[in-house]
Image: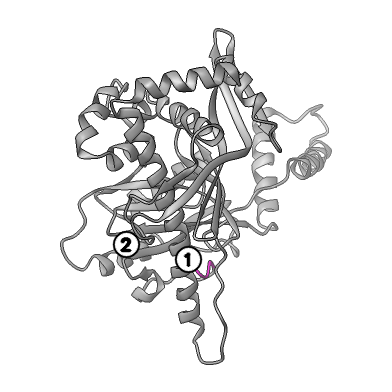
Amino acid sequence: MGLFSTTMSFCQFQVEGHLPAHDVVDWAGQRLAEKMFQSIDQTGAPISTGWVHIDDGWQSSFSHAAAYRRDHYLAFTLRRDLRKVPKALLKEYLARAERSFLQAHPGLRRVPRYERDELRDRVEQALLAKILPTPSFFDVVWNLESGLVTFTSCSGKIMEIFRELFKDTFEGLRVVLFHPYARARKLVSAGLASELERTNQASSNTVISLVSENQWIGHEFMRWLIYRTMVESSRYVVTRPGPSSQGVPFIAYLSNRFKLRVGTDSGDQKLAISGPQDHYREVCAALRDGKEITEARLYLEADEQAWKMVVKGDVFHFGSFSCPPVRLGKDDITEEGNAQEAVFYARMHALETGLQLFDSLFGAFLEARLGPGWTTTQADMGRWLASA
């Protein structure tokens, strides 16, 4: 599901490195063109990966900036075509090839191993040439002002393919996951920055360490939010920059879907809870048993508009993300290219407003967690959980 889908899943990265001092857009176009997608429809190649247009996955020319530039965004799509022979089909045709081989060599009772390997390669290549590749598309939106890249996949394998292709394409740059600690460092107020550094449990500055050793951020954020959902006010105000005005009120709460986990000597114990909740009794019971909320569905509402998403607390990936629908009127005057750009801007406005609300919510948690009143809040949360 891409940027223009009703719902989508995405993660975010920070761009690290030095951009060219001048002509960034032209430089980006040249780099994209060098790694543009190459079709394998008329070949027997099993796979092809490259860049295409974000609003037309069958176009891969980046000779004009209009193909990928959208104001302060660079927008393009990772296309990956994969041609694969079904196992059952390969097994059947390989068996036929082996029978033919044995008929031609009556002195053999079985196909020698090296011959069988060669037969398998020849059969697979012959079948691959007859199979059309299956395309996959993953949108990329690079905000040149913030340095953040939004990528519409949360698959570890696809994310790694994206990281490697981005690095190969844009020489001197790389993308690093915008994980909870990195997000906290960017959002926390100057007065609490030192307290955030003090709570950093990572043993090094590697992404793996900052994510795996700071899972407390997601755990405590989710626990605080379910407490606020049940006991305290679910009302907040916009405090972070973005499309919405500062001070605009909004509502945030968790509901309908939870995943919890606790680590034990015998491995992780996991629990999934979905559907309407009766005072969240199952969730509270799991929290009392030592489990932590690792994933939950978050609702955000502001100005009679609603956003819904599944937040993965350990990495802050956003799944099943839906935002207010984009509705643009059609006429006979507007050119198709301009209409597509209008849809892009409207979609980005809705998406970035939702992220602005999320950042304001996460910022409110950081102010509570790192502020002097956290001990009292913890005690209140403990009493609520014990009586829930």
Residue under the point 49% across and 18% down = 382
Q: Which residue is mark 1?
A: 54
Residue under the point 15% across and 61% down = 21
Q: Nearer the viewer, residue 153 or 381?
A: 381
Q: Which residue is mark 2?
A: 31
Quadrant in the picture for residue 278: top right
Q: Nearer the viewer, residue 307 or 136?
A: 307
Q: Nearer the viewer, residue 271 or 277?
A: 277
At mark 1, the secondary structure is loop
Q: Amino acid at mark 1?
A: Ile
- The C terminus lies in quadrant: top right
Q: Is residue 225 magenta?
A: no
What secondary structure characterizes most of the magenta part? loop
Q: Amino acid at mark 2?
A: Arg
Q: Is residue 154 visible?
A: no
How many marks on residues? Answer: 2
Residue under the point 42% across and 72% down = 61
Tell me if 26 is positioned left or right of 129 in this view: left
How crowded pointer 1 is (Cα within 10 Å; few <14, some 14-19, many 20+) is rated as many
At mark 2, the secondary structure is helix
Above or below for 104 versus 322: above
- The N terminus lies in quadrant: bottom right
Q: Which region shows up in magenta?
A: 53-57
How crowded pointer 2 is (Cα within 10 Å; few <14, some 14-19, many 20+) is rated as some
